Image (cartoon, rainbow, N blue to C red):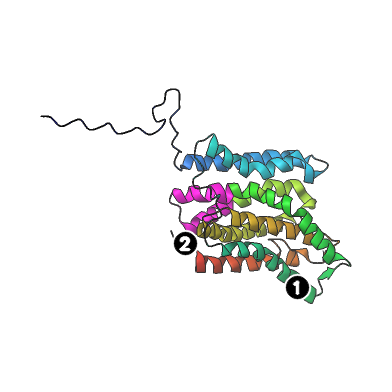
């Protein structure tokens, strides 16, 4: 007598349902995708800066918006239209959440040291009512600055960092590669803004800015690797910009030697602190993957 046939294994719900498209498998990281991202952000940055250069109100021009949106647009486009998926975008809060506190304090502390040294040398002067105005400007600008930081960081730390990691680019090289593109991306904007961006001659400002961005890329890259999240970089970037823009307002503080004491990454005092921070953070927490 033959044994009864075993029942057929149940199929997964909807696996063969008529009219239903099979789920698409996300495309793996590729050098093609990285190249498309890099070329795309640079092209959009140049186009935005051309529009920006001819605008009467540069701060609110469509060119400025296109520029700041370009990393976000390219990252979202590649992850959706390019079908690369969102698995490695780092959209969860992540692990090692002490990095969020570091993200809030790091750049404001560097700015504070630069201004304190300037005060002690007689090169920085606080204005009457400046402290109150500083608080108002920081609070009032925090949402917009953090939103702009999100537009950048979803590209740099949310897309490019994990894509390069998936392609086998190791820690420090990866952070510096992201930083190099990040720095070059800023150049059209800096040139288009002209005197509204800095009083320092561009021949000095741009090289100093490159060093600063590379240092910041190492620190934010380590934060991204340690936490697995893009959000610490968003927080750091948003807080840094909100505080810096407030401290660059001459109604808050007057800086006689901005090349040295300005509360911006390429100010020489801040720049030195950023380089030291990058070395310490990398040596102590860098992941040599």
Q: Secondary structure at mark 1?
A: helix
Judge from the rendering whether residue 289 lies leftward or rightward of residue 156; answer left or right. Answer: left
Q: Which residue is mark 1?
A: 116
At label 1, counting other C-alpha atoms closer than 10 Å, the crowd grade (few under 14, some 14-19, many 20 or more) is: some
* Residue 175 image position (x, y, % from top left): 53, 56
* Residue 56 image position (x, y, % from top left): 83, 41
Question: Which residue ends up furthest to the bottom in the rendered image?
Answer: 120
Q: Quadrant of the N terminus?
A: top left
Judge from the rendering whether residue 150 lies leftward or rightward of residue 280; answer left or right. Answer: right
Residue 49 appears in the rendering: no
* Residue 170 image position (x, y, % from top left): 45, 56
Q: Quadrant of residue 133?
A: bottom right
Residue 160 appears in the rendering: yes
Q: Which residues are magenta?
A: 155-180
Q: Quadrant of the C terminus?
A: bottom left
Q: Residue at x 74, y 74 (%)?
A: 117
Query: Which residue occupies the foreground of this view, 225 or 268?
Result: 225
Q: Which residue is mark 2?
A: 287
């Amino acid at each position: 007598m033959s044994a009864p046939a075993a029942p057929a294994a149940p199929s997964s719900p909807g696996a063969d349902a008529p009219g239903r498209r099979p789920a698409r498998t996300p495309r793996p990281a590729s050098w093609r995708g990285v190249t498309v991202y890099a070329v795309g952000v640079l092209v959009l940055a140049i186009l935005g800066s051309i529009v920006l250069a001819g605008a009467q109100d540069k701060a609110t021009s469509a060119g400025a918006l296109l520029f700041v949106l370009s990393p976000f647009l390219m990252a979202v486009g590649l992850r959706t239209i390019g079908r690369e998926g969102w698995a490695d975008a780092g959209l969860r809060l992540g692990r090692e959440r002490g990095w969020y506190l570091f993200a809030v304090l790091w750049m404001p502390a560097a700015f504070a040291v630069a201004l304190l040294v300037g005060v002690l040398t007689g090169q920085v002067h606080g204005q009457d009512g400046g402290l109150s105005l500083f608080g108002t400007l920081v609070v009032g600008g925090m949402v917009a600055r953090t939103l702009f930081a999100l537009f950048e960081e979803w590209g740099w730390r949310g897309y490019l960092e994990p894509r390069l990691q998936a392609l086998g680019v190791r820690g420090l090289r990866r952070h510096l590669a992201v930083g190099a593109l990040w720095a070059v991306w800023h150049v059209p904007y800096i040139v288009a803004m002209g005197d509204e961006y800095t009083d320092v001659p561009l021949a000095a400002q741009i090289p100093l800015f490159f060093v600063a961005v590379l240092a910041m890329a190492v620190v934010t890259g380590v934060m991204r690797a340690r936490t697995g999240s893009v959000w610490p970089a968003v927080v750091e970037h948003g807080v840094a910009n909100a505080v810096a823009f407030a401290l660059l307002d001459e109604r808050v503080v007057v800086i006689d030697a901005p090349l040295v004491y300005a509360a911006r990454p390429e100010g020489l005092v801040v720049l030195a602190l950023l380089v030291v921070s990058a070395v310490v953070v990398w040596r102590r927490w860098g992941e040599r993957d």
